[in-house]
Amino acid sequence: MSAHAADAAIPHTVEPHPVTGLPNGKFGIWLFLASEVMLFGALFSSYVLIRTQAPHWPPEGGLSSEILNVPLATVNTAVLITSSITMVLAWASCKMGRIDRFRLWMGGTIALAFVFLVIKYFEYTDKFHHGHFPSTNNFYAIYFTLTGLHGLHVVGGIIVNTFLLTIGTRLWKVDRDHFTNRVENAGLYWHFVDLVWIFLFPSLYLL
Amino acid sequence: MSATTTHGHAAHGGHDAAHGHHELPFWRKYIFSVDHKVIGVQYGVTALVFLFFGFTLMMLLRWQLAYPGQPLPVIGKLLGENAMPGGVMAPEFYNQLGAMHGTIMVFMGIVPLAVGAFGNYVVPLQIGAPDMAFPRINMVSYWAFLPGGLLMLASFFAPGGAANSGWTSYPPLADIATTGQTFWLLAMVLLITSSLLGSINFIVTIVQLRAKGLTFFRLPFFVHAQFVTSFLLLLAFPPLEAAAVMQLMDRLAATSFFLPSGLVISGEPLRVAGGGSPLLWQHLFWFLAHPEVYVLILPAMGIIAEVIANNTRKPLWGYRLLVYSAIFLGFMSFVVWAHHMFMTGMGTTMSTFFQTTTMIISIPSVVILTCFIMSLYGGAIRYTVPMLFATAFLPMFAIGGLTGLPLGLTASDIYLHDTFYVIGHFHYVVAPGTIFALFAGIYYWYPKVTGKQMNQTLGKIHFWLSFLCINGVFMPMFFQGMAGLSRRLYDPTIYVHGRAIQSLNVFISWSAWGLAIAQLPFIWNFFASLRHPKAAENPWQSTTLEWAAPSPPPHGNFTTPPVVYRDPYEYSEPGRSSDFHPQFAREA
Amino acid sequence: MAETAEHSSPEQFKKHLGQYYVVFVALLCLTAVTVAVSYLHLKRPLAIAIALVIATVKAGLVAGVFMHLISEKKVIYAVLILTAAFFLLVLLLPSLTIFEGVVV
């Protein structure tokens, strides 16, 4: 494929650079994650600012844990954590040459991601049924926007992982290391999505 | 062009050298190309078109400022009854022109040209790489930029016209503005995505794909400049993206991220939850927009460095100083942003903090300028067209930089903030600063990209006319600002102090229209030179790696991977007969 | 410090797998702890501090072990330290600017 020809002509696509020790893709994904840290950092900064300047939080009284569904979100936290380990096991399977195991663990990761989104769907629709929308007040605005953007990142992860599970596996037959690197990079992204939730969950639901 | 053979079946990856012997279909060779040179040209042409469009918006705007309330002959009728009723500019249209001029020039003109075009084309060549690290991401980057730019332009056709809340889109106004603002926000999301993908590509490419022997301190300064720029883009843009998402939520989902409680608009209380902060937007916007101005200047400094070294026939003075200053400048650019917000009511501790960092950041800029000026001393200066622009850059950037100081000092900023002084300041840095550097770059690298030389006489006419007119446009603005004339004012003559200096507006506008005419020789030259005979392989007798490849380089750039043997600017080495010693030449 | 997973043989690699399972269990436990603590309804500053500490430990485990950050290359550390600095800037400075003199 000339697409591969474009890759193959580029040094250090698979073999690491002798000085940095990194293949290009891994370096690239870490840089992308750095930009994502700034993206979610700005949103957390907005949360801090709006919440600190509000006379009460939540604005209409009560506690965050009373407005939001803590048990459901705890389950979701466990779901994402589990999807992280299945992701790392998917990569490990590639390292050990077991493409069949890879399919199992990657499939599990994608399935768990869907579970996360389904639970989020129930959370959101429950709010809407009670007449609570992002416009209701800034508590809901922040909740929907932060978890919404995070949810979009989950969707992105599902797309990438599904690609790797299906069409992308063709690369396994041509260049195992290249494919393994791609799985590792996708894993780094996926763990980051988990990481963001690890901070989102207490910040929004518990505090 | 090297001969290509057609294959029924593309060979699978592994051994394909940098020859590209597949015959790609037209749409993959020229439209969705993954070759950094094609993408660079795509960026360049698109950015130049956007630049001229943004320039046209300004020319319209200048009519209203010179002749407020007067019908614009001929063109006035063509723009429709909404924008120009009876040929007279409507205030709403004036606001659109102002907001879109700034937005288009910064985000769709200068950065795509400086980084997307020059960076993409030159950096892989200057480091001896066959392409960027991620060619397909490079292609996606351009194809996020173009739709973003087109969406931005399409906003002129939205009900209520284009975005009209300034390029800074401050809420609460931007939150409640017409539909064009939503276009602006969505277009920005696309443009930011393009930028992010590009910055990742640049950083990985520069670190990982350097040729053998090309250590960090043998890189041309142009590459260092692009490297720092890419970090700025990578880390500073996301907060603006977050802010854009929140403003979209405010506009489309009726949230109140930026809307305070108790807001009353035209006598009616706004029916939103409130509790938001307009200042939050300002912080997130300027967190990007300040590093953004260093994104505007750093690649320009990079181009100037190349042109000066080449046309003085001596190494740059203070090369390491330049590199460290660029890095320090990049880092400091993240800690000064609130000097755009001195008038928002912040306390003295924080404003002193930002004033201090702003004063500190002037140091590396001065160091860089000093190194450039020192580089002229003792040089055998050739006043080629690129060198004319590069030499002019020096005092122009100095004026721009010096006039920034009273803005960075809180006490004087109280008076000067939001006056024409600010407009004069930043335009000096960007227009006779960066844009002159970009012109220098176009004249300098045109032979590389096309294999032809531009006409030098037309180039000199372009330079002198532009230099004259551009100073005519921006110098009077300092005086307008000191006289207290506000920016973004539809009719400056509603104020006594505006009426007193209205002749300056007339002078500026005519200089601006003169500046437009000054570009005609350039536009003609740009296209007509394509029909010139083939130029020499290294017409400027330059030492850097891009000139080791043929002009224009084939897919894969170098027939054999280059090796670097020495520093980037080995000109006029004592004892050698030739006055330049290329980095890639093996012989001592 | 320790040899990176990329360089081990499949057999040695299996030992690394154990680490992943340990971290997995730890993460679930810490999640339970953080939820349990929230039911104590501690005072705001203390509640925030504890929640953030636990979250940081969890994040550290995910980043260090799952993302292999613990044995990552210097270049990556440099990028992340730079990012962390700017992250703190964007997180704290806007609020500081608005609330200077208002709080405390």
Image (cartoon, grey):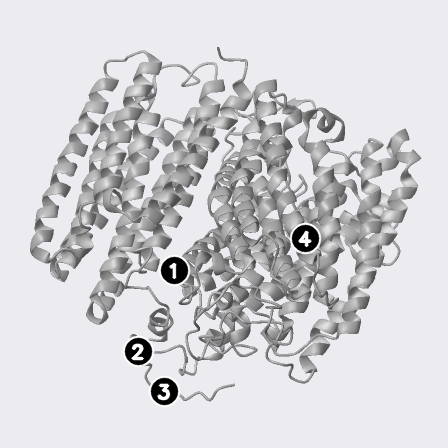
SS for tag 1?
helix
> Residues at marks 2 and 3, common chain?
yes
Q: What residue type is disc 1 on?
A: Gln
User: What residue would you read off at disc 3?
Assistant: B7
The residue drawn where x is 21% and y is 38% is: A81
Amino acid on which disc 4 is placed: Met
What chain does badge 2 belong to?
B
Q: What is the secondary structure assignment of the residue under circle 3? A: loop
Q: Earlier in the sequence, mark 4 or mark 1?
A: 1
Disc marking residue B374:
4
Numbered marks: total: 4
Give a yes or no on whether discs 1 and 3 share a subunit: yes
Q: Quadrant of residue A61?
A: top left
Q: Is residue C10 left or right of residue A53?
A: left
Q: Are marks 3 and 4 on the same chain?
A: yes
Chain under numbered label 4 = B
**Labels 3 & 4 near each other (Cβ < 8 A):** no
Mark 1 lies on residue: B208
* Same subunit: marks 2 and 4: yes
Left or right, A64 with reference to B364? left
Which residue is at the front of the view, A117 or B276? B276
